[in-house]
Amino acid sequence: MENFQENISVQNERALLVGAVLKNTYSDNLAELVALVESAGAMVVDRVLQKIHKPHSATYIGTGKAKHIGERAKANKADVVIFDNNLSPAQIRELEEIIGVKVIDRSELILDIFASRARTKQAKLQVALAQLEYTYPRLTRMWSHLDTVTGAAASGGVGTRGTGEQQLEIDRRLISKKLTELKKELASIDARKIREIDNRGGLFKICIVGYTNAGKSTLMNALTDADVYVENRLFATLDTRTKQWTIEGSKKVLLSDTVGFVRNLPHQLVASFKATLEEAVNADLLLHVVDVSNSEAHDQAQNAKKVLDEIGCKDKTTLVLLNKADVVAKDSQLELLQTIYPDAICISAKTGMNLDLLKAKTLEIYEGGLATLRITINAADGKIQSYLESAAEIIDRQFGDNTVILDVRIGKNQVADLQRFKPMKVEEIDI
């Protein structure tokens, strides 16, 4: 079986881009597809945007338009035609026959980018699983060029199956076996990863989410000196990093970034990156970063929210950050976004603009209001004393026989964490 990554890779290829949009809907200008293609290492030589009443069953865009694209591909010496739509295996096979060059769709392109970005073992396994999940129903297209059945074989007699059909059955068995192995290995890593997330004690967990290239890694670096890899290209970061972030005094939280979202993110990737996205699912607060310098900022924010809803974050406390506000091209766009997201904070992760406001708002959410408590504990219990030193303001401390009495001012959200420490006596007081 051919290596799937090599089969779809567009590195150093000349690409003709095609976008088919339904009439009376939003008209995509292919800007995002251009960014994806360039991020994959290909060169855009031409682009075609076509309005359609409904997708054509055989070619998605219609036979006549497919022939026109074939002529454009030949004139521009294109190596690959990339659709901004998700196509069926039959549609890709038909289009390749008409156009005369390799055809891939949006999902295949994103899978190619993820494969080239994966660095850790977990990320590589996640991408490999997503690729095979995508490949399995498309095996017929991948091996159609080996089908040499002719003559008597055409009648479907016994023993007349061609090389392609025989290879197809072999590949299905191989992929089925490989899928089982990958899922087993990834499940082991995922379980360990999820245990790590669950076992992070009582620390407040914050996750940075948002569209790819919105500035999540830059923000992570600005807040924690995490030294996360940053580059101005889509999906520069696939692996989650978690660092401590001091929001005030000794009050620390855990801050994680995640893989960026994108419009029509292949569901295979969402499924295989489950453990990575678990950071967002288990977070106490989401920081949703929106690139306001991008003309499609609102649509990108909505697409990111759609993915968050799909993975179980619909009701999660979320703080919207309008990033790159220092370089926004049109004030009117920023004003519109501020109207849509009235509680958002305008920031610049790159320059540090308004990060003090972000800290203040995060602290407010972290505390959820303040409670004043008198806590009596065993003098030998160092764990709760250490926790209170970091999570609360110590107002008074008195020592008794084998006990310590602490008057503290603590966030109401942190009061529930005290239940982890026993035995102790907790009472609310007025000071």
Image: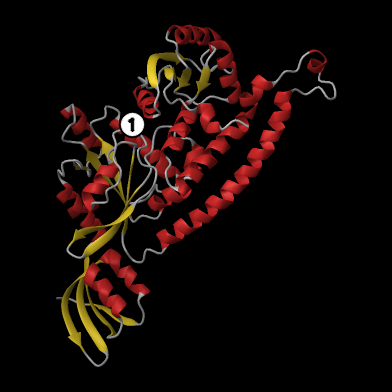
Q: Which residue is drawn at 57% across and 48% down?
A: 183
Where does the image place residue 326, in percent across and percent down from the top left? Answer: 15, 35
Residue position for label 1: 299
**Residue 400 visible in the picture:** yes
Q: Out of 390 and 104, give the one closest to the viewer.
A: 104
**Location of the N terminus (image quadrant):** top right
Q: Which amino acid does label 1 sit on?
A: Asp
Vertical order, 99 against 362 (above or below)? above
Q: Which residue is drawn at 47% across and 42% down?
A: 270
Q: Is residue 232 left or right of residue 311?
A: left
**Residue 368 visible in the picture:** no
**Location of the C terminus (image quadrant):** bottom left
Where does the image place residue 17, in percent across and percent down from the top left? Answer: 42, 18
Q: Residue furthest bottom?
A: 401
Question: What number of labels is visible?
Answer: 1
Where does the image place residue 18, in percent across and percent down from the top left? Answer: 44, 17
Q: How crowded is mark 1: few (under 14 residues within 10 Å), some or many (20 or more)?
A: few
Judging from the image, what secondary structure is the residue with disc 1 in? helix
What's the image's color scheme?
A: secondary structure
Q: In this view, does 78 lie to the left or right of 39?
A: right
Q: Out of 220 and 266, give the one closest to the viewer.
A: 220
Q: Out of 102 and 299, give the one closest to the viewer.
A: 102
Q: Residue at x 47, y 18 (%)?
A: 81
Vertical order, 52 against 256 (above or below)? above
Q: In this view, does 231 lie to the left or right of 117?
A: left
Q: Is residue 277 left or right of residue 427?
A: right
Where does the image place residue 407, in percent across and percent down from the top left? Answer: 19, 78
Q: Which residue is drawn at 14% across and 43% down?
A: 353
Vertical order, 286 against 77 (above or below)? below
Q: Which residue lies furthest to the right in this view?
A: 158
